Image (cartoon, rainbow, N blue to C red):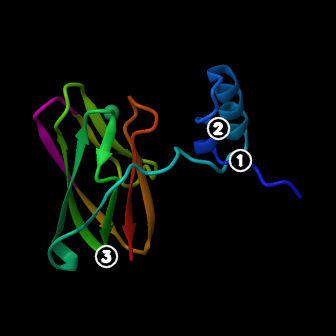
Amino acid sequence: MTLLHRPSRARLLPTALLGAALAMTACGGGDDGPGEPNGGTVQAEGPADAQTATVVSVDGLKYDPGTVEAVVGTLELTHRNASDVPHNLTFDDDALGAIDTVTGGQSKAITLTFSEPGTYVFVCTFHSGQVGQVVVS
Ligand SMILES: [Cu+2]
C-alpha cells in the first residue's frame, strides 16, 4: 500500500509543471476539497443564540483567522477586507450562503444558523487557496 502525497507537499516540488500535474491528479481524487484552511483561530464571542466573530482578508490572498470556533446556535460572521483587492466569503454549503464581495477597507456581515456540530468550509471564489472554516461544536 502506497500513501498518497498530500497536495501541500506537491506544491513544494521545485518544478512548477510537475507540481501542477500532481495537483490536477489530486483534484481527480474528489475528496481534497478546496484545500487547507488558512492559519489562525478565533473563538466566537457571546451566547449561543448571539455569537459574533470576524474574519479578515489580508494581503497574500488569505483569511486571518482561517478558523472560527463556534457552538450550535446563531453566529453573526463579519468579513472585513484589510487588503487592496476585492474578496468574498462563500460557504461550500449553499444553504449557508455567502457574504458578497467587499473591497479594501470595507466590512459586511452574514447571520448564520448552525443546527448541528460540524466543519463548515468557506472560500473566496476569486482566489484559490483562500480558505476558511467555521468549526461548530
Ligand atoms: Cu479573495
- 49 versus 8 height, above or below: below
Which residue is denoted by mark 2 in the rendering?
10
Mark 1 residue type: His
> Which numbered disc flags the more N-terminal residue, 3 or 2?
2
Q: Judging from the image, what secondary structure is the residue with disc 2 in?
A: helix
- 24 versus 56 height, above or below: above
Mark 2 residue type: Ala
Which quarter of the figure is the C terminus placed in?
A: bottom left
Mark 3 residue type: Val
Q: CB of mark 3 within 8 Å of CB of mark 1?
A: no
Q: As drawn, is 12 to the left or to the right of 108? A: right
User: Quadrant location of residue 24?
Assistant: top right
Asked if the residue at label 3 sits under 8 Å from ligand 1, the reply is: no
> Which label belongs to residue 71?
3
| Count of marks overlaid on the render | 3
Which residue is denoted by mark 1 in the rendering?
5
The x, y position of residue 20, in whole percent, is 64, 26
